[in-house]
Every structure is written in C-alpha cells, then in structure tokens.
Amino acid sequence: MQQTDNQRGLDELRQARDESRSLYIAVGVFSFFANLLMLTGPLYMLQVYDRVLGSRSVATLLALSFLVAFLYGIMGLLDYARGRIMARVGARFQTRLDRRVFDAVVRKSAVAPDANAQTGMSDLESIQRLMSSPVLMAGFDIPWTPFFLAGITLFHPWLGLLAICGGAILIAATALNRSMSSAPLQKANATTQQAAIMGEQIRTESEMVQAMGMRTAAFDRWQKSRDASLHAQVAAADLGGGFTATTKTFRLFLQSAMLGLGAYLVLQGELTPGAMIAGSILLGRALAPIEMAIGQWQAVQRARQGWLNLSKLLTDVPPEQPRTELPVPKANLDVQQLAVVPPGEKQAALRAVSFTLKPGQALGVIGPSGAGKSTLARALTGVWRPASGKIRLDGATLDQYDPDRLGEYIGYLPQRVQLFEGTIAENIARLSGTPDAAKIVSAAKKAAAHDMIVKFPDGYDTRISANGGRLSGGQIQRIGLARAMYADPVILVLDEPNSNLDNEGSMALNGAIKAMKAEGKSVLIMAHRPAAIQECELLMVLDGGVRTAFGPKDDVLREMVSNHQQIQQSSGKGGGVQ
C-alpha cells in the first residue's frame, strides 16, 4: 500500500536512477570479465600443484607466473574502472535530484515542519553513498556465485555439495539479518535524527539557554534523547555485528572444511592436490560478495529507508509546473472570502476575510494574539495556500506567479527575523549568487539601516552568524527590513515590524513606509503597538480569525473606542443590578 501511495515519488527516483542505465551496463560488462578473471588464482594453483611440481619445470612456472601477473593487472584495472563508474553513477543521481529534493524540503518545511522532510538531503546522500560503495558492486558479483559453485562441483560432487550448503546457509543468514535488523536500524536512525534536531535547536537558541540558566536542564533533556539514540545505535550495531562475526567465522570454517574434505578426497585418490587448493579459493571468491552484503547491511538498510523517505517526500510535494511569466504587477491587492487552515490542523485560522488594497495605501491589521494576523501574512506571501477564497495581485492569483518572482514582488518581514551565515550584504541580497551592490545599498537606505551598517568595522562585508551574533534585535530587524525591500517589491508585508525597534528605529520604519506609498506601492502591517500603524490610512481588525472591522483608520479606531465605552457602561450597569 505504501508503494502505491508513493508511486509518483518512486517513479521520479527510478527515472533519475535509470538515466545511468548505460553506465550500469558498462559495470555489468566489466563485472563479467572481472569475475571471469577471478578464475586466475584457482587455475594457477591447479597448474602449479598438478603440472609444475610434477614436471619440475622452472620455465613453465615462470610463464604461468607472468601470465597470472598480467591477468591480475587487468582484473585490478577492471575493478578500478568499476569503482570509478559507480562513483559517478552516485554523483549523477545526487546531482540530478539535488535541486528537486532541496525544493521539496523547503516547501514541505515552510508549510509544516516535518522531521522526515528535514532529512531529505541526508536521505539522498545515503543512496549516493550506497551507489558508490563496494556493497553495490558486490550485487554485480553475486550472480556469479552459482558459476563458481558449479566450478567447485566439477572438481568433485562432494565439494560442490559442501559449497552449496554453505552458500545456502549464508544466504539464509542474509535474509534473517534483513528481517531482524530492519526495525532496530529504523529506530536508531529516528532517535539519532531526533537528538540531532534537538541539539541544533539548543545551539541556535544558545543565547537564551545561557541567559535563562537553562544549560543544565537543556543538557539533561538533550542527553536523554542522546542516550536513547546511543542505546538504539548500540543495539543495532550489536545485532549487525553479531551477524557479521557469525558469517565471517562460518565462512572461514567452511573454507577449512573444504580443505579438509579435499584432503580426504586426495588421500582417497579421487582429487588432485591442485583441485583441492583451487576449490578452496573458488569457495572464498563465491562467498565474498555475500559476506560483503551482510557486513555492510546497515548501509543498505539506511539507503533503503532513505529511498522510501524520498519517495514519500517527492509524492507529497510534486514538482512545480512552469508558469508563464507575468509582467511586474501593480500594487493592487484583492482578497476575496479568504479562509486559511494551518498545515496539520483541521480548524481554519482565518475565515471569510475580504479587503482591497490600492497602490499608495498602507493597511494596518490589529487584533489580539492568536487572531490570525501572522496567518494572514503567510497567506499573502504565498507560504500557506488558501483553503478557500482568492488572493489576487494585480488581477492574477498568487499561484500564477513563479514563487521566486512572487518573493520579489511581495517583500516580507516575518515576526521573527532569521539571518544566515555570511555577510550583511549577502543577507540583504537574499543570498544571491550575483548580488547587486547598488540595490543592496538602496534597500538599506530605504530601511534606514545604511548608517547603522557602515558603522560596523567591515561595513556591509561584516560577517554575521545565523543567530545574529553580536547584533541587537533591532539591528537584526532593520537588516531584515532591508532584505524585504531588496528586490524593490510592489507590496510590503510586515509582521510586528517594530517589536524590537527603539524610537529611532520606529521613526525609520515609518519613513520607509511613507516612501513606499509615495512610489505607488502598498504596505500591510500586522501590529500590536499603535506606533506601527501611524502611516496607515486603512485599518482592519481581526478577532478569532474573522474580520470584525475594516475601513479608514480613524473611523475604525473611533468605532472601537465607542464600542469599548458601551461595553464598560453595560458592565457598570450590570454590576449595579447584582
């Protein structure tokens, strides 16, 4: 059922894998000759014991030795070529899917943080590592095991029977290893991933952890997750190590048993000493790929789980279809009966919200915590899709715009600004590979952050960490505002923009909003503080996800004050009655 549900993702993975079909065929051809050349050792021993020692011919020994050296050299070159080809097969597979998986991880995590989605890139790497590992080449060698066993049988049926029974036992051990180690490995991977996510979260919030005296509590919580991960890893390693040690021991015993049985047959005159030695060498070659598969089964299981995870991720997040590029829109925003259900929830956070915003206007959105202001901001920027209703930018719905283009047209300052490792200029330029210095400075000036930035020792080239490092909350917010304005957006969505700003920062923000309006652009501000809506002509009140008021700012505020006075008067009268 899972395979059926994830069929679309499986098809994408198979298509990427099959692009290297010709290389797989080349590896198969090389494997044919490499395994054929594996007969060099047994045949050499057979000739040395049965012919050279009997004839005592040094010339024959030298000729055979030179021939064997040449054949082993060819075999080494073939093995080297196989390894190089498979390394490139893995690299091609990863390169082919890097962008697709990256986009899927970002899109999935943006709407609903998902641990499985966050491991998408590591899942892809686990498959790539398997493709480049010796264990996959062992898969090309395993089909030749029956031929080696048949060769042993040609020496003597008893030797063949012993080899076949031993091989069957090892194959059964491989199947048992797969069935028994699957659950422990999945648990180990899941707990390791959980511990890594928690550790990264604590590292990101290290300043808060330090300031609030949470180091011991955070460590205890992380250590509990870490211990669970270690226990799961040890249990999986113990199980896998047990199978590896058992199969290795059994294979060595089997080779000795082959020598013992061969010696008995030599004593009985039914086998030559050369065939005895050659049979033992052939047995080791026949069972080597099986032992390799058992020893590296954790890598196989990890890649298999990564394959399943990726198939689900790519199914849940289908590739975006190319869109016809629309012209740069005007700042006309029309929201019609908008309803938004947050990902993973069943209840709508916004219901039947409608409003229109014209060029040169600023709309303030106010309301209590949990009223739906941030939900509206995410919907207006295209992060969350409407459950019903429409959001139109200059007449076109948001899904008609390419996401990267939409990000240029609608600038966004989230409630919590997150910077990236790099310079201030790189952050303002949205990590662009070809940043425009003039646009960076212009955006910083519009956000009134230019003077602040040039006071840093390295100015725009000052390197900062993901958590902002030594930057204050207000400085981070002003850099975030400059980043929102970098692409010269036609609409600016600001979610609690002055939550960390001082008076100077608030005045700079109001100046930026005034400049946007003067250029015929629009601004939406989700706010709690009155200073944030100073430049707004329109005001909308949200409460419980529903629009309770909308219109000119002064009219809405007057109505709110009037309603508030009426409620107070009603409460006072009620108190007198009681």
Image (tube, grey):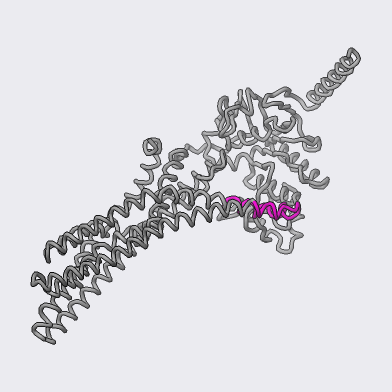
Residue at the image point whose x is 17% and y is 75% from the top: 45
Q: Quadrant of the C terminus?
A: top right
Residue at the image point whose x is 76% and y is 33% from the top: 536
Residue 300 visible at all: yes
Q: Which of the pair 555/476 is nearer the observer?
A: 476
Q: Which of the pair 264/55 is nearer the observer?
A: 264
Residue at the image point whose x is 60% and y is 52% from the top: 224
Q: Is residue 103 magenta?
A: no
Q: Give x and y (percent) for residue 507.
A: 81, 44
Q: Is residue 403 above or below residue 553?
A: below
Q: Is residue 374 above or below residue 123?
A: above
Q: Give x and y (percent) for residue 492.
A: 67, 39
- The residue at the far right in this view is 576
Residue at the image point whose x is 42% and y is 50% from the top: 97
Left or right placement of residue 466 versus residue 505 in this view: left
Q: Is residue 215 magenta?
A: yes
- Provide the residue span drawn in magenta: 196-220
Left or right placement of residue 494 versus residue 253 in this view: right
Q: Quadrant of the N terminus?
A: top left
Our reading of the magenta stretch's main secondary structure is: helix
Q: Give x and y (percent) for residue 493.
A: 67, 38
Q: Is residue 207 above or below residue 391?
A: below
- The residue at the far top in this view is 577
Residue 87 visible at all: no
Q: How many marks?
A: 0
Q: Give x and y (percent) for residue 430.
A: 61, 50
Left or right placement of residue 70 versus residue 424 in this view: left
Name which quarter of the figure residue 147 lies in. Answer: bottom left
